[in-house]
Image (spheres, rainbow, N blue to C red):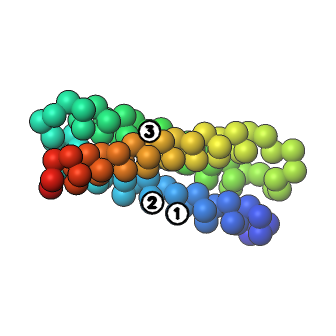
Amino acid sequence: MPPPQLERTIDFTKFTLGLAAAGFAYIAETAVKRHDWCTKGIGLFSLACFAVSVVFGAMVLGRATKVENLDNEKTLLFVGKVHSLFLALGLASGAVVVVIRIIVQGE
């Protein structure tokens, strides 16, 4: 059984991976099939961000199961930051897609 701090890291990463997967599915279904290039381009950027986030999230889970504690664990910290950064970029660009669809195009 991992220490409590690692257990929280694993649980949080599972949650954010689910969020990235849901964002990927939503953007793939709505934005990429659009005819206007602005929404499609932002949607493709969002998909790329979600994909990178999922890859680095899986790396966080893999690394977290191998370490004993988080003391001097720089790899897990770096990979976790990259995972969070790309998740935030994907969510922000996904929000822009939603705003474009609702406000500008009136759907």
- Say which residue appears at 45% left-offset and 60% top-offset: 18
Task: Specify which label sits upstream in the sequence, 3 or 2.
Answer: 2
Which amino acid, by three-letter code, is at mark 2? Gly
- Say which residue appears at 43% left-offset and 49% top-offset: 91
The spot of residue 82 in percent (x, y) is: 60, 39
The spot of residue 72 in percent (x, y) is: 87, 44
The spot of residue 28 in percent (x, y) is: 26, 46
Which amino acid, by three-letter code, is at mark 3? Cys
- Quarter of the picture containing the C terminus is bottom left
Q: CA distance from mark 3 to mark 2?
A: 14 Å
Nearest-to-viewer mark from 3 and 1: 3
Mark 1, residue position: 15
- Say which residue appears at 35% left-offset and 40% top-offset: 47
Residue in front for this viewpoint, 97 or 18: 97
Mark 3, residue position: 49
Label 1 close to label 2 by CB (< 8 Å): yes
Which amino acid, by three-letter code, is at mark 1? Phe
| Left or right of residue 5, residue 33 in this image | left
- Say which residue appears at 52% left-offset and 57% top-offset: 16
| Left or right of residue 49, residue 97 in this image | left
Is residue 28 something one can see in this rendering?
A: no
Q: Residue furthest right?
A: 71
Mark 2, residue position: 18
Using a 10 Å C-alpha cutoff, classify the residue at mark 1 as few (fewer than 14 neighbours), some (14 to 19) or many (20 or more).
few
Task: Specify which label sits upstream in the sequence, 3 or 1.
Answer: 1
- Mark 2 residue element: helix
